[in-house]
Amino acid sequence: MCGICGIINLNGERHTELQETKVKGMIERMKHRGPDDDGYFTKDQLTFGFVRLSIIDLSEAGHQPFISSCQRFTMVFNGEIYNYIELREELIELGHEFRSDTDTEVLLNSFKEWGDDCFNRFNGMWAVAILDNLSKEVTFSRDRYGIKPFYYSIENDNLYFASEIKPILHCLEEKVAPNDTLIYDYLVHNRTDHTGDTFFRNIKKLQKGEIAKINLGEKSLPVFSKWYDLEENVKRAQPFKTKEEFRESMERSLKLRMRSDVPVGVCLSGGIDSSAITALLAKNLNIPHLNTFSAVYLNNRIDESEFIDEFNWENITLNKVSPNSADFMNDLSDFVRGMEEPIPALGPYAQYKVMELATKKVKVTLDGQGADEYLGGYHYFFGFYFKELLLKFKLGKLVKEVLSYFKVHRSFYGIKTMIFLLLPNRTRSLLRFKKAKYISSSFYKKENKNSIVSDSFYSAKTLQEANLKHFQHKLEHLLKWEDHNSMRFSVESRVPFLDPELVEKGLATDPTLIIRNGTTKYILKESMKGIIPDKIYNRQDKSGFAAPQEDWFREKEWRLKVNEIINSDKFKNRKYFNLKYINQVFQDHLDGKVNASKEIWKWINLELWLREFIDD
């Protein structure tokens, strides 16, 4: 696990000492991603930079930029190839020799042997840049699901790339501008990272499952293509048929992701996903000792302690942190800068504190991200399922599921979601705007037509299609937050639910095994019966890592902070807000009339981000 960066001159000009100095500056700005080692490589019009967090083969043999034994290929690589042992054995049979035990060398020799097809053979997470010194071609690649980030920008015939945005900002000469369409999606739809754009207009992402090629001899722009098509792979996948089959696939994923030469722990929230990981490791895979890391809020309604404490098993050590509003105030600047882009809720701050705790004991964590997106884990997926049953005229099944839903949840939310999803696209967008009255009407009218969110998220006609759309367009922001939080504290985070077999077969699975009898993630839950504690198996609510922002924003210190921000000249001069409504909503929140904490956070997070990255 590492950080990568680099500069490529697209006009054929050889790099000078200035470019090397810039890359050294990029390295300095992401040293937290790799405190164990760093290096850079310059050849002709290209300079690669690298920082290392040593996980597999801790020796100097893992130093990057990594040069192949034949001297033809030079590579910088961020991530892990979990099936590197099996690939290494195959490559040795094909005549390749190895001078290290790293997955890095396996990746490069795989590229040498199979070219771009090697990426289809990898089970892992990666962002990689490879120079072929013979053909003068550079290849960029990103993993199937966007677990590892890859940002880039082109300015004045130079292409800059890095694992984070700050190193690129260090290099750009022109003033950066905000991406108003993404700001609109963030404020109206709570969505980020659903396209190849970032909140910076001139900085983009190599998208998940994508390759970019640059021919250094032709003075041309990069050429992009997809090496992985999720939808096509799901069509070819054999769906899960039984809970035993799902559990066995999960165990295979965990065995691969426990490969490490440093200690591995688990981020435990008390929900079904992280509980499944913890229980399978401790019980089925017989891990002798396991550290878990959790955020708890004693005497608060969102506290998960009662579920986390169910894992007070002999071979598990429960490590907990209890963030409070004063902690958040102290961490605010570092947190905003670390996230690099606005985030629509404060759950990632809890994760930030968990990673700060985890780094004291482990270098690798396992996390439950991903299952919600392909197993219908969010509450609104009931609406998609009800919509599917209605459109297919399966009225008896619809009535049964609606009644089961109400019996379990005592809520009409699923029905309301179904009705919302049946509305025309234009009407849905208008309703979202009316709910977000704090947005300037002129800003809404300008950017609404540019947003793809309504079609990307709400147009699905079946539960399977909804899962697929959400997996493709929603998951990545969770993965980005996880990457930035974990790497901020030099921790590698692995996500077992994103094993390709689990994802593809999960997305192909019949909806009756996804939602049944008022329960989401049905096949996962049933596969864990008798393995996870009964108290967790029987719970129907969903929390995950969260923060008590409703209460925090009513405390004096935060009341003063929010007031200072929303009444500042800078905030008043932004084009995004309806100032009169904002002040009224904040006062209503302080008076306890409403819970507007999510909206309040979006206002102040956006403003602090603008001050940190745009204004100066």
Image: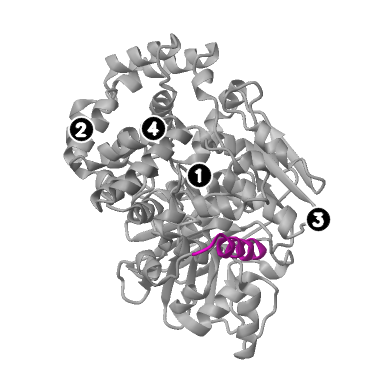
Q: Say few, some or many: other residues with alpha carbon within 10 Å of mark 1 (under 14 / 14 to 19 / 20 or more).
A: many
Name the secondary structure under disc 3: loop
Give me the C-alpha separation between circle 2 and circle 4.
27 Å
Q: Is residue 255 magenta?
A: yes
- How far across and down, in percent of the image, does residue 188 sit? 30, 34
Q: In the image, which disc is placed on residue 430?
A: 2
Measured along the vertical axis of the image, is residue 563 above or below residue 327?
above
Q: Say few, some or many: other residues with alpha carbon within 10 Å of mark 3 (under 14 / 14 to 19 / 20 or more).
A: few
Work out whether mark 2 precedes mark 3 in sequence or the reverse, and give the earlier one. Answer: 3
Give me the C-alpha separation between circle 3 and circle 4.
48 Å
Residue 240 shows in the view: yes
* Amino acid type shown at disc 3: Pro
Q: Quadrant of residue 51?
A: bottom right
Q: Is residue 122 magenta?
A: no
Q: In the image, which disc is placed on residue 288?
A: 3
**What is the span of residues highlighted in magenta in the rendered image?**
241-256
Give me the C-alpha separation between circle 2 and circle 3.
55 Å
Instruction: Check disc 1 and report the residue beneath it.
Output: 481
Name the secondary structure under disc 4: helix
* Amino acid type shown at disc 2: Leu
Q: Are marks 1 and 4 in contact (CB under 8 Å)?
A: no
Work out whether mark 2 precedes mark 4 in sequence or the reverse, and give the earlier one. Answer: 2
Instruction: Check disc 4 and report the residue beneath it.
Output: 610
- How far across and down, in percent of the image, does residue 565 sit? 41, 19
